[in-house]
Image (cartoon, helix red, strand yellow):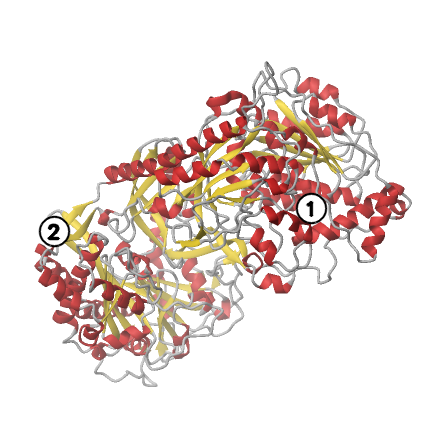
Amino acid sequence: MAVPARTCGSSWPGPVRTARPWPGHGPRPFPDLRGPASGPARLLLLLLPPLLLLPLLTAPGASAYSFPQQHTMQHWARRLEQEIDGVMRIFGGAQQLREIYKDNRNLFEVQENEPQNLVEKVAGDIESLLDRKVQALKRLADAAENFQKAHRWQDNIKEEDIMYYDAKADAELDDPEGEDMERGSKTSTLRLDFMEDPNFKNKVNYSYTAVQIPTDIYKGSTVILNELNWTEALENVFIENRRQDPTLLWQVFGSATGVTRYYPATPWRAPKKIDLYDVRRRPWYIQGASSPKDMVIIVDVSGSVSGLTLKLMKTSVCEMLDTLSDDDYVNVASFNEKAQPVSCFTHLVQANVRNKKVFKEAVQGMVAKGTTGYKAGFEYAFDQLQNSNITRANCNKMIMMFTDGGEDRVQDVFEKYNWPNRTVRVFTFSVGQHNYDVTPLQWMACTNKGYYFEIPSIGAIRINTQEYLDVLGRPMVLAGKEAKQVQWTNVYEDALGLGLVVTGTLPVFNLTQDGPGEKKNQLILGVMGIDVALNDIKRLTPNYTLGANGYVFAIDLNGYVLLHPNLKPQTTNFREPVTLDFLDAELEDENKEEIRRSMIDGNKGHKQIRTLVKSLDERYIDEVIRNYTWVPIRSTNYSLGLVLPPYSTFYLQANLSDQILQVKYFEFLLPSSFESEGHVFIAPREYCKDLNASDNNTEFLKNFIELMEKVTPDSKQCNNFLLHNLILDTGITQQLVERVWRDQDLNTYSLLAVFAATDGGITRVFPNKAAEDWTENPEPFNASFYRRSLDNHGYVFKPPHQDSLLRPLELENDTVGVLVSTAVELSLGRRTLRPAVVGVKLDLEAWAEKFKVLASNRTHQDQPQKCGPSSHCEMDCEVNNEDLLCVLIDDGGFLVLSNQNHQWDQVGRFFSEVDANLMLALYNNSFYTRKESYDYQAACAPQPPGNLGAAPRGVFVPTIADFLNLAWWTSAAAWSLFQQLLYGLIYHSWFQADPAEAEGSPETRESSCVMKQTQYYFGSVNASYNAIIDCGNCSRLFHAQRLTNTNLLFVVAEKPLCSQCEAGRLLQKETHCPADGPEQCELVQRPRYRRGPHICFDYNATEDTSDCGRGASFPPSLGVLVSLQLLLLLGLPPRPQPQVHSFAASRRL
């Protein structure tokens, strides 16, 4: 055809077609459809191109072949539609299976899912389950308070006086590199026998409790030994609780001293490196030990803060952030003469995982310069706390100041902002080795109901950044019974291997008094917790009666999901909760925002919405109708929702009372019947308690058959609903083989297989040999083709999945196929349901040849029409495949069929990887719409370290002034010692990982990250449409048309003549977001709706604030430190001595 003069077009992200002069015809007559045109004008634009292109298609001077006209291509499209429909009617068997169900109407009943009744029943069952745990919690908390009150403190207690099972003892004894310093304590450690318990996924001993003590706490200290002494009595209460409720899982007491006593006993799951577990930093402990917090952290970055001290401060701030939960709000600022936020956050933000990560990264960029200005720092902090125009906790307001010291007390600031009510607590931290007077820092804390801490070295960071929780717990203790309220946590990973759990927490108070008539003690003893596995809650929800696309979900007051089919974290970190927002678990829209708000507010509701859903394989988007019903779960902070498609309002329940028929249908599950009846895959469901699970379906079927030879489908140990439906569907699908498939010659229509899958869990593939290449999930509810077929009318094509990074398909022995499936809709009276999906598997290579013929100017019998030198012909997809590109693309933008032989091995790839120019044109002309979302549960490979040396990252280089400073030498000596002994252990991320250790560590293999997902789906254009990809001499004509009753787009286009105008490529594959998803700085400006706990304990008039920290300030011994440094240089590091921090003295029991 005649080609107009060409110029290069625009590049991505602009449209492919650009306005330009049209030779001989004036300006180009059809503007870009992605422009402002809309409504009637847009419709006109859609209709104009076919007419306006007619002069071009038959332009004078054209070659013998011209681009096919629109009516020709519409004719091809109809032939394709008829061929697909004919094959599916003959071989698919949807109509025949519908009749088979009706013929067997006496073998099943139609039951109705009543959403309101269902969701209320499940909510009630969950409430009862959690209430039993609450009663056990209360018994434990009351007993703990009484045991501690009756306990007599012993100053002279010795390790050999206490017998207990040290959960880490076995790991330490087996560690050839373990320190000898703890060996003396092994004499008081019990040696226990354990037995495997499937409920705990662990070996346990039900006769004893186990004790875990953090690595950085000395087991032989008087405080710890007294703690072990009185908590031993809890063992009998744990055992009695389990006797009353055998379903109880871990029962745990987390002490404020750091001791964890849990039941039943099991060895600690120690990591390969040092064990960093400290119960006081667990999400459940933090939530139970204090009310929500509004915290502002201010960091002194004046020039007096040396490099070593600044590094200590950065680490301290990061550790402080780890003590905050999603109920808390925080901001971090640095100050010298002026104060400024360290990050992009200009106000308090929720202390969720992503916001805390922003803070931690920003803190590392702090630089010391200028002079100290406490006034600027505190004024900034008070202004932050007084800002009432933002979402915040409105409880426990506090300022945490990290500094190396100063003389200014800024009393005028406190008088202005905080006195006389003192509603803001001030905690001060003296960081580093120095000789400054710390009295002003002590005074600030003591006069503002806070506490003063010293962090002279890295070993003091973890303890002193969490002790403030004891101060916050004072009002709770003084409130007494009013504060004894059970709280339920977010979802998190159990440290002992139970999987995802939630924990009920209850604070335990110190009820002792210092003497007759004295004020009662105001210290919190710790937090009692009882775990509930998510799987136990899931078992209370209906599974298979809701259909493949129905489900139950639950959220908490933050909008985070407790239950949801999309809650599937790829990596788990026991130090962080699993926080997936409901709007991130699904594709967000206004209706779901409204539903989420109503659930958080504790309301009931029902709403039918039209929404977008992502396919199970995350390649497709479907627009569907869903019914949402929700109710609150009483006595908890959770709300329960139910989602049902309209076609899942009803479901089948088999009624196989005829045992002879049971046996007959069961025989079709035997492998001996597969050759004649087709291969049967059964869904790996929990049909019976004694059924052994297996990931291999052949083995699972074998286990199932062996069990069924011992029990009947009506056995009490089996799920009768699942078994009866499975056996019924086995018989019904066998009748489909008998009536339809067995007498058909699949090769006639180039089919590799035919198949049927059912709600009952049967997938039958015919013929039997086709099962060798069957890669779909044997659980229909987890098969993408099954779920999409239910949500879409007509025939759903599913090409084989291809990753762009993998090699192309191998077309050998005709084994590569394309699935085509459709749902079987059954109408019984006024009740409609979709109990099955049927389909065929097309032979890819044969159907590609068939596709050429159907999109050509001949019939099956004719020979290809060739155009003579003097005649004028239209090109077609068979004869002119060197000039004309013809493809079928599915609704996700993936290539299904092509007339180009070299593209057959690219079937299943995103079409932009095949022809980027054409795919962009289809997108720009609204044939496709793009949907972007974020996967917050992804797992990514670790980033390669930027430092290949063996030295610590970010090593401080002293200046000349530092060398001349005697104080620097003393602090540097101590720092080097602690750096060598502790950095490599506690903060090993600052060092290069040991490859041998990293190899077996999940944390080093992969980590959680955010992935950006992009899916495409059909846009608003349904009509046949001609257009041009305008690029000067490289311009291309194309025609696109949706095929009726399918998810296919038929595209005919000129092959590109040159590559001068290659447009930007549309991306579909998942990409890593280095910034952790959407810009956090923007997201915090429009925070999602949430509600914090409804109670707050941050004030009590009787609180005694006199205990506010009196850190020991003494000059370091230069001789000792120099000796330590020399020992270090000689490679003789001394044995570290146990540390007793200043707060321990106040914890006498």
State whether residue 345 appears in this view: no
To which quarter of the image does residue 241 belong?
Answer: top left
Instruction: Pick whichever, 989 or 172, lies toward us.
Output: 172
Q: Residues within 10 Å of mark 1 (few under 14, many from 20)?
A: some
* Quadrant including the N terminus: bottom left
Between discs 2 and 1, the one toward the N terminus:
1
- The residue shown at (78%, 45%) is 308
**Type of amino acid under label 2:** Leu
Residue 480 image offset from top left, x and y in percent: 50, 22
Q: Residues within 10 Å of mark 2 (few under 14, many from 20)?
A: few
- The residue shown at (71%, 60%) is 947
Residue 867 image offset from top left, x and y in percent: 31, 83
Cα separation between marks 2 and 1: 67 Å
* Quadrant including the C terminus: top right
Q: What kind of element bears circle 1?
A: loop
Mark sitting on residue 364: 1
**Type of amino acid under label 1:** Gln
Which residue lies most toward the right here?
Answer: 964
Which marked residue is nearer to the observer: mark 2 or mark 1? 1
> Where is 362 relative to 10, above or below?
above
State whether residue 1097 appears in this view: yes
Q: Left or right of 646: which side holds 468?
A: right
Residue 734 image offset from top left, x and y in percent: 16, 67
Instruction: Pick whichever, 226 or 706, lies toward us.
Output: 226
Residue 251 image offset from top left, x and y in percent: 45, 40
Instruction: Pick whichever, 257 or 1043, lies toward us.
Output: 257
Q: Left or right of 94: which side holds 216?
A: right
Q: What kind of element bears circle 2?
A: strand
> Where is 652 relative to 887, above or below?
above
According to the image, label 2 marks what residue? Answer: 828
